Image (tube, helix red, strand yellow):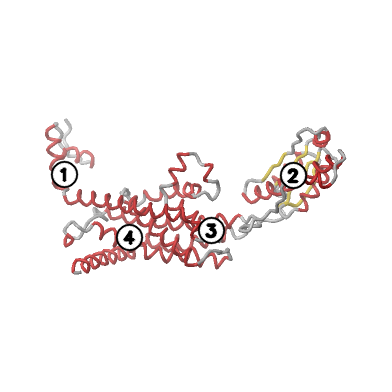
């Protein structure tokens, strides 16, 4: 019992010291409070209008036939698109797009109707304004829906001309009856699937950058996050990990609940999952992020190097979460690479529970993966801190061995250090 009391007391003191270090670092507070609290609001404001309706498009109809007229009317009737102009040629349509009067162009070549009549493959061209993904999405979805409907209509007309009855035609055109049902995102709201991924990614990225900034600052001051208090007598690595991790766990458990529950409620984002199950998954994810950040922060030697990692890794982590591209289509390398990051499983688990409204069984694979990641990163952080602590305690012995080796091979380390530091008094041989 005495050992346990001392163990928890030491861990608590290390946690309190870590919280003091965080509170005294203005840049770190800006990262935690600014990025952790403001970023979720900022992203939701940016993607507030995730549903774009009546996107104006121009039509160039060189075919000028009954089929193209019907296609144009049906496109104009969709929620996604509105026919803003009918142009005589592509030059006129391009000028309208350049003037930002339309956000897309639908072009029917002159042989479109003739090819359909001859039962050949007819093509039409779609052009979208890529200044916003929402324009591209609407143009693609609107024209594809009408195209699929028109294909069915053309088949019905051909079978009717061949003398078939309505029942026979329906069995050929639609042999298996089905109804389209998209219960989780009926309007194809861009923000619903993207924001959920970004919210979870913010937790991982902000924690990693904050912990790494503090580690880099301490190393610049010749301190180390791995240094153990003398009273722990070199047997307190687990206490260091638990104490430091506990400080970040407390902070990001609060930030995580703010991101996962409060922000969606503010912006009216559907939360279909059970609160207790979603919270359990969230706390597992935060724990995973703590040991992930602690492991990789041991490699950070300078404070500013974290921001270079920020620019390169954030979009990669978002892509690897599978929110914008199906995971099954990933090359093997990227699929295995994605397993490094807790966000890969945290995003998928959160979307299964909160967005899709599933139960814990729907996130079972992600939960098991996060537990395995947590165990692995606990031991890697233990190993990294143990090695660094051993190096610190044997620094003099290591330096003496380096000096002896340099002397044996004829290298004057003191003179080399003076030359590297720019000391003009160093002799030149």
Q: Are marks 2 and 3 in contact (CB under 8 Å)?
A: no
Q: In terms of secondary structure, where does tag 3 sit? A: helix
Question: How far is disc 2 from disc 3 in space, using C-alphas?
Answer: 34 Å
Q: Position of residue 175 (x, y in %)?
A: 73, 45
Q: Which quadrant is home to the C terminus?
A: top left
Comparing marks 2 and 3, which lies closer to the viewer? 2
| Disc 1 secondary structure class | helix
Q: Nearer the viewer, mark 4 or mark 3?
A: 4
Contact check, label 4 and label 3, Cβ < 8 Å: no
**Residue linked to disc 2:** 147
In the displayed structure, would residue 192 be above or below residue 131?
Answer: below
Viewer-closest of 289 and 304: 289
Q: Which residue is rendered at x = 45% and y = 46% of the image? A: 338
- Per the image, the residue denoted by label 3 is 43
Q: Earlier in the sequence, mark 3 or mark 1?
A: 3
How would you rate the neighbour count of disc 2 (Cα within 10 Å): few for under 14, some for 14-19, many for 20 or more? Answer: some
Q: Nearer the viewer, residue 323 or 124?
A: 323
Q: Position of residue 360 (x, y in %)?
A: 48, 60
Q: Which residue is mark 4?
A: 245
- Residue at mark 2 to residue at mark 1: CA–CA distance: 73 Å
Q: Is residue 143 left or right of residue 272?
A: right
* Horizontal relation, residue 405 to residue 16: left or right: left
Q: Is residue 19 above or below residue 328?
A: below
Disc 4 crowd, CA 10 A, few/some/many (<14, 14-19, 20+): many
- Provide the residue designation for mark 1: 398
Q: Earlier in the sequence, mark 4 or mark 3?
A: 3
């Amino acid at each position: 019992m005495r050992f346990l009391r001392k163990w928890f007391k030491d861990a608590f003191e290390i946690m309190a010291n870590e919280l003091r270090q965080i509170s005294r670092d203005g840049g770190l507070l800006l990262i935690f409070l600014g990025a952790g609290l403001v970023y979720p609001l900022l992203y939701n404001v940016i993607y507030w209008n995730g549903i774009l309706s009546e996107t104006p498009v121009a039509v160039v109809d060189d075919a000028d036939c009954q089929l193209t007229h019907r296609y144009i009317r049906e496109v104009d009737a969709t929620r996604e698109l509105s026919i803003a102009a009918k142009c005589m040629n592509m030059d006129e349509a391009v000028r309208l797009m350049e003037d930002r009067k339309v956000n897309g162009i639908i072009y029917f070549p002159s042989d479109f109707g003739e090819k359909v009549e001859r039962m050949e493959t007819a093509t039409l061209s779609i052009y979208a304004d890529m200044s916003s993904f929402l324009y591209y999405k609407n143009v693609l979805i609107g024209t594809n829906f009408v195209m699929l409907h028109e294909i069915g209509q053309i088949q019905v007309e051909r079978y009717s001309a061949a003398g078939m009855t309505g029942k026979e035609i329906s069995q050929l055109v639609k042999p298996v009856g089905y109804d389209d049902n998209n219960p989780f995102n009926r309007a194809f709201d861009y923000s619903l699937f993207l924001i959920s991924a970004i919210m979870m990614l913010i937790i991982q990225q902000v924690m990693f950058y904050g912990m790494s900034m503090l580690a880099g600052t301490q190393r610049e001051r010749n301190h180390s996050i791995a240094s153990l208090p003398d009273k722990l007598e070199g047997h307190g690595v687990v206490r260091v990990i638990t104490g430091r991790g506990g400080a970040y766990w407390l902070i990001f458990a609060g930030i995580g609940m703010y991101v996962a529950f409060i922000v969606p409620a503010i912006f009216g984002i559907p939360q279909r999952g059970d609160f207790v199950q979603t919270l359990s998954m969230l706390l597992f994810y935060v724990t995973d992020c703590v040991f992930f950040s602690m492991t990789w922060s041991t490699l950070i030697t300078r404070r500013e190097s974290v921001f270079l990692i920020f620019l390169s890794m954030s979009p990669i982590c978002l892509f690897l979460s599978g929110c914008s591209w199906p995971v099954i289509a990933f090359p093997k390398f990227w699929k295995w690479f994605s397993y490094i990051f807790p966000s890969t499983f945290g995003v998928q688990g959160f979307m299964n529970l909160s967005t899709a409204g599933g139960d814990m069984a729907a996130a079972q694979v992600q939960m098991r993966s996060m537990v395995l990641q947590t165990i692995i990163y606990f031991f890697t952080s233990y190993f990294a801190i143990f090695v660094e602590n051993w190096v610190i305690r044997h620094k003099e012995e290591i330096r003496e061995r380096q000096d002896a080796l340099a002397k044996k091979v004829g290298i004057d380390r003191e003179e080399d250090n003076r030359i590297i530091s720019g000391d003009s008094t160093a002799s030149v041989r």
